[in-house]
Image (cartoon, rainbow, N blue to C red):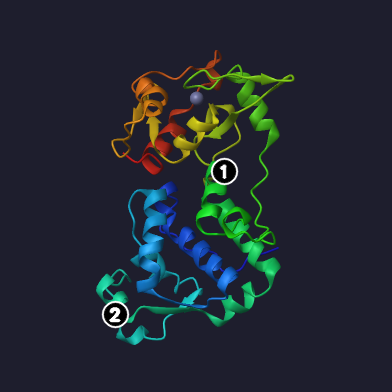
């Protein structure tokens, strides 16, 4: 089935291209719960900036809001009062003054069908987000039933490839490549996950050299760009995170600048290409 209204994002830039997908999911969440079809920039700005900042480290709400017009999703009734610059962008001043936007008729017609709405949200998740982020993003945009208290919300998280998980788990001897965590319960390993270094949503392959076995905590933080790895496989912790907690020291500071626990076979070690993608596109710096 073809999904209508694909988003035009500027480049395949991991975490930094998430502004628009987060914006559209949030708008759909508002429509789903409150049947809201029109939004002023002033009401959207503080809430969405917070969510976007939490996921990408650098909030830019002007561009994603305005540029949803180019995807046929939003239309701006006061468009003629908004000054457009050479690169097609607009100023925050104009959006604060004239930025009222409504879903375009076509898009509204499309998401009024509940199956389309679900399919659209699932496609956005699949196309842009790392698997470990899906639960949290749905929670933040009120599209899961935990946050909305509405059991009818049925946006599903993607099914993982069990073969990839097994290959990576074996290569890493069922231990987190950072902290060495390993736990068996009734013959199966729990709480460790196969992370894609280059995200699946950006065509990162299901190969061991694009994988890392990480415990739940390290997986989530790796996908959020809290740390990355150098060419020498040493952890670089971002300056953008801080905490006074003992856990921060124990689970992150402790491993900073330390090498990964790599698999024995050279074919299995992370490929520099994928690590470089992570450093450029996900790492918060
Ligand atoms: Zn770990």
Residue 283 sits in which quadrant?
Answer: top left
Q: Quadrant of the C terminus?
A: top left
> Where does residue 51 sit, x and y in percent of width and height?
42, 55
What number of labels is visible? 2
Tell me which corner region of the image, top left, top right, bottom left or bottom right, holds residue 17: bottom left
Residue 48: x and y in percent read 41, 62
Name the mark on residue 97: 2
Residue 114 relative to residue 80: left or right: right
Q: Nearer the viewer, residue 51 or 200?
A: 51
Q: Residue at x 30, y 68 (%)?
A: 87
Assign the N terminus to one quadrant of the image: bottom right
Dot label at residue 67: none
The image quarter in which residue 4 lies: bottom right
Q: Distance of mark 2 from mark 1, alpha carbons? A: 38 Å
- The residue that disc 1 covers is 131
Q: Is residue 234 visible?
A: no
x 65%, y 75%: residue: 112
State the residue at coordinates (61%, 56%): 144
Vertical relation: 81 (above or below) 46: below
Q: Is residue 237 above or below residue 147?
A: above
């Amino acid at each position: 089935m073809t999904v209508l209204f694909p988003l035009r994002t500027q480049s395949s830039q991991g975490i930094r291209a998430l502004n628009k997908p987060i914006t559209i999911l949030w708008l759909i969440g508002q429509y789903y719960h409150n049947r809201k079809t029109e939004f002023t920039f002033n009401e959207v700005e503080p809430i969405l900036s917070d969510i976007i900042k939490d996921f990408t480290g650098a909030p830019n709400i002007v561009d994603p809001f305005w540029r949803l017009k180019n995807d046929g999703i939003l239309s701006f009734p006061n468009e003629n009062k908004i000054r457009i610059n050479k690169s097609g962008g607009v100023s925050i001043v104009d959006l604060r003054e004239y930025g009222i936007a409504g879903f375009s008729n076509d898009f509204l017609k499309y998401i009024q069908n509940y199956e389309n709405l679900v399919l659209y949200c699932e496609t956005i998740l699949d196309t842009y987000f790392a698997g470990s982020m899906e639960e949290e993003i749905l929670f933040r945009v009120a599209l899961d039933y935990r946050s909305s208290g509405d059991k009818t919300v049925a946006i599903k998280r993607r099914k993982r490839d069990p073969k990839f998980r097994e290959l990576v788990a074996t290569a890493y001897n069922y231990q987190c490549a950072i902290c060495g965590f390993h736990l068996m319960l009734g013959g199966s390993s729990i709480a460790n996950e196969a992370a894609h270094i280059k995200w699946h949503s950006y065509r990162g392959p299901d190969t061991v050299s694009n994988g890392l076995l990480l415990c739940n905590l390290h997986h989530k933080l790796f996908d959020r760009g809290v740390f990355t790895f150098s060419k020498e496989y040493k952890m670089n912790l971002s300056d953008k995170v801080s905490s006074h907690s003992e856990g921060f020291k124990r689970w992150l500071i402790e491993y900073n600048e330390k090498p990964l626990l790599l698999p024995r076979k050279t074919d299995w070690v992370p490929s520099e290409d994928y690590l470089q993608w992570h450093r450029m596109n996900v790492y918060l710096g």
